Amino acid sequence: MISVLNPINSVLFLISIFFAVSIVFILLGIDFFGFIFLIIYVGAIAVLFLFIVMMLNIQKIETDKFTYLTIGVFILIILFMELFLSLSYNYLLIFDSNKVFFTMENIRYIYNIFVLKSDEYYRFLMVESLGVMLFEYYPIQLMLSGLNLLVAMIGSIFLTNFKRGFSTKKQYNQLARNHYLINSNIY
Amino acid sequence: MNYSLSYILLIPEIYFFFSLIFYLFYTSILNLSIYYKFPNYFKNNLYFFILILFNISLLILNYINISEYTISNYFYKDTFISLLQLFSIFFSMLLVLIGYSYVKSNNINHFELLILFLFGIFSLCLLTTSSHMTSLYLLLELQGITFYILTSFNRRNQYSLESGLKYFILGSFSSILLLFGISLLYGFTGLLSFSDIYIYLKNIDIYISNFNFNLIAVAFVFILISFLFKFYAAPFHLWIADIYQGAPTIVTAFFSVIPFFSVYYLFLKLLLIVFVKLYIIYNIIIKVAIVSSLVIGTLGALYQKKIKRLLAYSSITGIGYFLLLFLSESPIMLYNTFSYVLLYSFSLLSLFSIFLQLFLIKDKKYIEQLSLLSGYININKYASIVFLIFFFSIAGIPPFSLFIGKLFLLTNLALNKNYFFVFLVIIITILSCYYYLKVIKIIFFNNTNKWLFVSNFNFISSFFLVIFSVLHFYFFLSPSILNVFTKYLLFSIL
């Protein structure tokens, strides 16, 4: 069932799904993957989707309810069955099955890890150990990668700046329907 | 891990880094000031550039007698490495001084040019010292990014932009291969430092078929092929002629002359020390690269009508000569090859420096077609004599410098009984004489009705051209002067 007609809104919902997935990763204990997932999918791919949706200018969207509804309900039942099975066997999550939902106990557990920094903390936060590695053992490499980004920034500013100087880009040629006739020397 | 003392050995590079950042801020604030209405102080920037490089070369001279690892195996400093840094700094100083008129008359005298040149020289200087895979990859990438931007620096020219894009695709593909090889190596061994990899490979017996060894060989082949891409050796030379042709000539000279010292030195270090146990694997790849780059370089250069395309193909042939080192086991070959590298890049620099001067006043462009040079002896007698010296030198004709380099290479190959390669190199040298002497023939014997209007050479560049042509004689008369530099190579490599 399609409840959101605007494609931009549906992309925003997709971003919320990415957020949820990254939270699942963090809860599984592979928090570096969670953050990388967030950075790559939300930072790059979802923004790309948004651009494409804005460029394509889609207005018509199918509102056929029943086929989507049946398939969706079927998939939903399978997903819930998986979830309950995993919870009952305590197989996937590192918490106890009692602690999965936001009980007082669970909140206290998270407070112990992140704020009081118990022994669990150091196992838990892979990102911090990565940061320690970068800043303690590879400081020069970090600076060099920063220098790479600086050079790339200088180059992109210089090559695309047409206030001071000249640009070979011609917007009307790019937007024209028969641009290959105008720019025949390229092909 | 001792950090406290080890940073002192890298003082020239640290000074370079800070002066580079200061130069970036200084030039961008000066040249973009709204109060002075966007002035173009290119000459001011140039003098500051020269001053920075001069200071750094003095600092390097101060720290020349050391051989130690600095900052926990990430960098290694050595007398020969310091000499290579001095060479790359000195050559780029000369190039920028000579190419000043080119930059000005092509209207690419933006301040970003010199900033990017400084970034390129910085990356090349640190690249020679790197002895860890991470620093190697990052510095190669820094060098690559500066070169992609510099290649497409002339934004008015569509060919320049196109060649920049092509160089970007080629370079990023090769660095992807390098990164993949490094990550495979790290996955199989867990090692990144050169010395650690050397010790690890030393303790493996390769004749017992070892699963891990084959995987390391796969990783090494990726690294090797990415380095061959970086040199434009022949099976991986695609687009290099377009890149040379499209880029502004000063940038072409920069990326065809200066990276050879550092990248080639690093290549030697990887193949002759770190992965020397894998000689059986890389031997055949190197042989294929030598034969194909010698043949394709000469056959491609035979029909070229533009000077930069000719030099591109001739540099592919040059790579074939450089790789001849791996055919013989004698350490004397190391000296000879490195002196050949020095002489070859010197003669390339001198050729580029004369082509940076040939400005046609009426057409407002630089000479690119070789046929435009016909009858140049009638216009400028002395410049055409300098042309003669440089082209004779690069062709390897006796009273000039590169003859010595080729002679030493050939005698070493003959002593090692590599007769196939000896005859191949002789045939290739004869063929390459054709296309170098064709230029001389056009200059001295062709006649045209058209009169060329070439601008005068400015004082600095003509001064350096005279010095270069004298040096081409001098290296022929006493080639032992090169041993002053190359005698440190043996301590550095072996």
Image (spheres, rainbow, N blue to C red):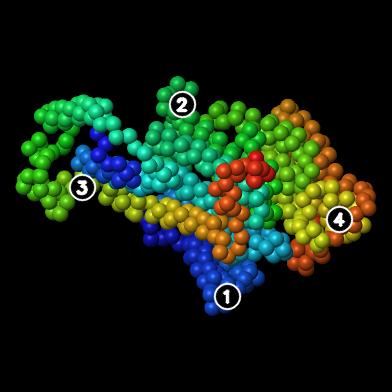
| B65, above or below A110, in the image | below
Q: Which of marks 2 and 1 is nearer the N terminus?
A: 1
Please state the total of marks drawn on the protein image.
4
The residue that mark 1 highlights is B37
Residue nearer the viewer, B305 or B36: B36
Residue lying at 39% horizontally and 41% vertically, measured from the top left: A58
Query: Quick check: A20 left or right of B184?
Result: left
Question: Is there CB contact under 8 Å for labels 2 and 3?
Answer: no
- Disc 2 is placed on an element classified as helix
Q: Position of residue B487 (x, y in %)?
A: 64, 49
In whole angstroms, how far apart are the C-alphas of marks 2 and 1?
63 Å
- Label 3 crowd (10 A; few <14 / some 14-19 / many >=20): some
Marks 2 and 1 share the same chain:
yes
The answer to whether residue A156 is seen in the rendering is yes
The answer to whether residue B57 is seen in the rendering is no
The residue that mark 4 highlights is B384
Marks 3 and 4 share the same chain:
no
Question: Is there CB contact under 8 Å for labels 3 and 1?
Answer: no
- Label 2 crowd (10 A; few <14 / some 14-19 / many >=20): few
Q: Residue furthest bottom?
A: B35
Question: Is there CB contact under 8 Å for labels 2 and 1?
Answer: no
